[in-house]
Amino acid sequence: MSRSLPAPADTRSTLAPAECAARASEAIRSLNRLTISYAPGYEFASDADQVLAHLRDLAQRIPQSLQQMGQWLALAESQGRLTDVATPTAQATRSTVADAIASLTMAAGYAASLGADLDRALSATSRLATDAGEEPVPYLPVDETSSR
């Protein structure tokens, strides 16, 4: 007897892809403004750790977006839906799409590397605590039985 998995929840956005990307871009711009050297953006080590976790997640999701864009370009070009406006020939359009896909593939690799580097940084920052004039919270629980 075969069992089927439940249907996935509908996670599609009502926003167009360009609007989603614009919002992500604006969010990074806002983050940069909030954390500029004279702004009180980071108060605790956990602030940096949480921001780093979200930036890592963002970087790790970029390759899929770029791959999907490349797939769309390839499909649209194969269906004759694209034209290189600078040189409106089929050969020029194919070449332009191939260049775009090659660049997207390279960028996806860089984004994957960024995500991995941010993950390593997160491993380090997750061990930090802010000393506010008191004893910092230890990363690992203290074994109080060994000091007796």
Image: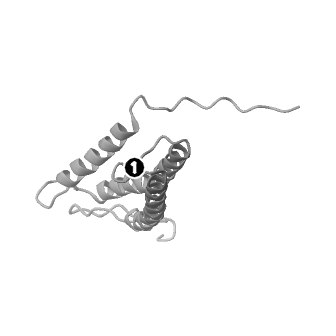
Q: Position of residue 22 (x, y in %)?
A: 30, 42
Instruction: Using the image as rendered, state which of residue 136 and residue 50 is in the foreground.
Output: 50
- Display colour scheme: one colour
Amino acid type of disc 1? Pro
> Disc count in the image?
1
Depth check, front residue: 21 or 75 = 75
Q: Quadrant of residue 43?
A: bottom left
> Residue 41, can we see it?
no
Identity of the residue furthest to the right in this view: 1
Nearest the camera: 120 or 75? 75
The picture places residue 145, in percent across and down from the top left corner, at 51, 66
Residue 45 vs residue 53: left or right?
left
Q: Does 125 sit left or right of 10 as displayed?
A: left
Which image quarter is the N terminus in? top right
Which element carries disc 1, helix, strand or loop? loop
Residue linked to disc 1: 88
Closest to the observer, 17 or 100: 100
| Coordinates of residue 76 in the picture (x, y in percent) | 51, 43
Q: Is residue 126 above or below residue 72?
A: below
| Residue at point 51%, 45% (across, down) | 72
CA neighbours of label 1 inside 10 A, class few (<14), some (14 to 19), many (20+):
few
Residue at position x 17%, y 52% from top? 33
Please say whether residue 81 is visible from this viewpoint.
yes
Residue name at image x 42 percent, y 56 percent: 59
Q: Residue at x 44, y 51 (%)?
A: 89
Farthest residue toward the left? 38
